[in-house]
Amino acid sequence: MSLPNITLISFGFFEQDFLEQIAKAVQTEFGLPVNVREGHIDLGEYYDPARSQYNANTLINVIDSMKFPESVKILGLFNVDLFIPILTYIFGQAYLSGKSGIASTYRLNNERYGMSQNEQLLLERTKKEVIHELGHTFGLIHCDNPICVMRSSTYLEDVDQKKQNLCHRCQEKLKNE
Amino acid sequence: MAKKLSILIVDDEESVRDSLYNWFIEDGYRVECAENAKKALTLLESDQFDIILADIKMPGMDGLEMLRRIKSIKPDSIVIVMTAFATVDTAVKALKDGAYDYVTKPFDPDDLTHLIRNATRQISLEDENENLRKKVITLENVEDLIGSSEAMKDLLREVESVAQTNSSVILTGESGTGKELVARAIHANSPRRFFPFVSVHCGALTESLLESELFGHEKGAFTGAMYNRKGRFEMADNGSIFLDEIATISSKMQVELLRVLESKTFIRVGGNKEMSSDFRVICATNKDLKSMVEQGTFREDLFYRLNVVNIHIPPLRDRVADIPLLVDYFIKKYCTSMNKPPAAIDVSALKRLQEFNYPGNIRELENMIERAIVVGDGKRITLKDLPLEKTIVNSSTESLDDFERAFIFQILQKYSWNISRAAKALKVDRVTLYHKIRKYDLKPLDQ
């Protein structure tokens, strides 16, 4: 029987090394082994032509319905533009104290903003976003500490300002969860 | 977040409710949802929300009608309206009806964050404003009138009842009992509390100075009067004037004062223009004004004008039960002002403080505690820090029996009711001491 772990499941093309580095960062932060998997779903079903975006509410439900018995948390990683009905876009979302979360690299990529590609920066941002959403699944809410990974980020600048780690207060909360 | 704010989301679209719900709980807010205005209004009857985020276009009652109803029940509610069909007209209408803001769906995550942050800031400012207002109102209220004894409870009841009236009040009581604090409490609880409380110590001023102080003076009225100056009656307009040591004023000033109290008008020294002022007068004295009237040293008509309500403030020796509270209050007060951590007090020191007679009343106790904090080690007040040794008995004892009773009691307390040691200290035998205890019905303090 496997030890409890976290599943990081990717949809769309991602370099293996990119995913492994994210998995390593997640393992360091939450102290649980991370299983990297590839997912295959028809994303077209979740596409909203009126908004030219993918519905994050339905995508998170797909992730939540997936069964990996040994996994305590599942994080779906996408590379498409996510939205929820009330907001123009989101970087990711999660069920607070639940099992699942999703994140997307789409709006974390420099090229999206007319700047040159920066793989390292994209990796750092994705690590932060994945750890942030997983933090919510562990019951952590947004943190006031500007460098804590649980700080709410609505712009890339906010993501770049924070670190990929939980602050001491959030670490304490995590221990008590 | 110091206070966990609550948000009510009202929208007929489930996906919108769910999205906002998930968004806000991640921020640590308490979130409730309602799918229509009717359900929202029902929720608002039993629960309070800091922010209400409501869609305009909903089946049944629309968001604007709901906004009007919420505002008519709770005008300070923060309601943010959302719509997918933005028109300038509906936006203006919503804002005119009291909406805090207006947003078009879908909105940018950053806009939502800013919107809620601004609303939160407004709520905390309103809370702060309310707290400060309460603080100002209670600033000179019961906080400074310390005590839970029956005598003190009676006094507070009297203060509360008289504060609501406009009647003149005479406060009587020994020196140091806190007459000015009671006067301030009356003012602070009265409808005049937002206007000045002006205090005049009549005993400290000569007749001419008191006249100028009370009525003001015009430039050149006397040598040194270089400017026009408002008098205390003028300053107390719409508020209260406290005349301390009223028994000390001269016959001439008594006449002047009577005239002012009757007409509420006066003329500045050296002036000729009649001024008027709407003030309430509160006086204080440690003398028996009635006896002074009988002796002819205080005007009877002024006495009756001032003595509409008489509040007697008991001496500290009659409210021994309040001493621990007062000691605690003064320790905190002086430790704070001297930037020291709060000191403790030995049980034996507190016991001795309760046995003391305090001819100088609360003022004397306050001075003792201040001195003890200055000379003590700063951590614990002990007997040696208290200047109690020299005063033995109550200065108000009137007969030899009273004196003997108080003296024997003091010695018994000092030796913790050890009869042999007390008898030895009194230089009498134990039988005599037992006889005296029976005669004066003496009992230990804590019985």
Image (cartoon, coloured by chain):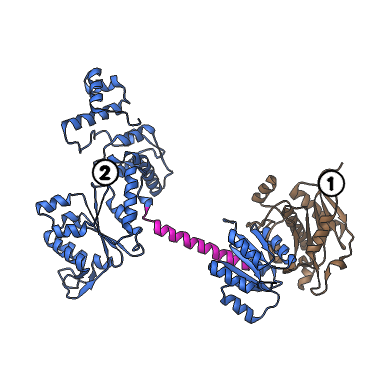
Q: Distance between the residues labelled 2 and 1?
A: 77 Å
Magenta residue check for B208: no
- Judged from the image, the secondary structure of the residue bearing numbered disc 2 is loop
Circles 2, 1 touching at the beta carbon (< 8 Å): no
Residue B96 shows up from this direction: yes
Q: Is residue B434 left or right of residue A148?
A: left
The residue that appears at 83% across and 43% down in the rendered structure is: A3
Q: Is residue B42 left or right of residue B349?
A: right
- Give the residue at mark 1: A70
The residue that appears at 32% across and 42% down in the rendered structure is: B371
| Residue B156 to residue B279: above or below | above
- Give the residue at mark 2: B315
The magenta segment is B114-141
Residue A92: % across, % down: 76, 62
Magenta residue check for B119: yes
Amino acid type assigned to the residue bearing label 2 in the image: Pro
Q: In which quarter of the image is the C terminus of chain B?
A: top left
The residue that appears at 25% across and 21% down in the rendered structure is: B434
Residue B218: % across, % down: 19, 72
Q: Residue B200 carries which label?
A: none
The chain to which mark 2 is attached is B
Mark 2, residues whose alpha carbon is within 10 Å: few (<14), some, or many (≥20)?
Answer: many
